Image (spheres, grey):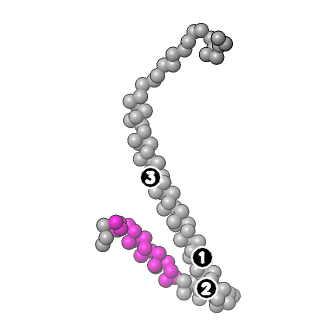
Amino acid sequence: MASSVSPDQYRRTGRITAAFERVSPLTDYLIHHGFTGPDAAVAAQGRLYGELQLQVSLLAFMDCFRVIGWLILAVVPLMLLVRSFKVRRKSSGCALTPR
């Protein structure tokens, strides 16, 4: 196993391979329900591709959510370290006065 590939990626790849092994039974199901052979194959691949896209979208959302969570956890201590700053105001009117 290469060091740059996580075990999770191997598990996901196995699931994708298992999903594409379902094309034949899904094609047979669609043929049984009135599709022609080529149309059933295309529809089965499209259905599995759509399911794959849904899963990929969920995984991407989870990754972004995790990153945003870590960023928030990193910023909270910084917010506690920063004291409230007081803005010094000049008592002599507007800064844009004619000379």
Check disc 2: other Cα within 10 Å, few if <14, some if 14-19, many if 20+.
some
Residue drawn 34% across the image and 66% down it: 4
Prevailing secondary structure of the magenta residues: helix
> What amino acid type is highlighted by mark number 2?
Ala
Tell me where the magenta segment starts and ends, as one range: 4-22
Q: Position of residue 65 (x, y in %)?
A: 48, 52
Residue drawn 49% across the image and 78% down it: 19
Measured Cα–Cα span from mark 2 to mark 3: 38 Å
Check disc 3: other Cα within 10 Å, few if <14, some if 14-19, many if 20+.
few
Check disc 1: other Cα within 10 Å, few if <14, some if 14-19, many if 20+.
some
| Image quadrant assignment for residue 89 | top right
Q: Which residue is mark 2?
A: 41
> What amino acid type is highlighted by mark number 3?
Arg
Q: Does any portion of residue 52 appear in the rendered image?
A: yes
What numbered label is drawn on residue 66? 3
Q: Position of residue 38 (x, y in %)?
A: 64, 89
Task: Pick whichever, 26 or 61, lies toward us.
Answer: 61
Q: Which residue is mark 1?
A: 47
- Whether residues under marks 1 and 3 lie with C-beta atoms below 8 angstroms apart, the answer is no
* In-image side of 75 versus 54 (left or right): left
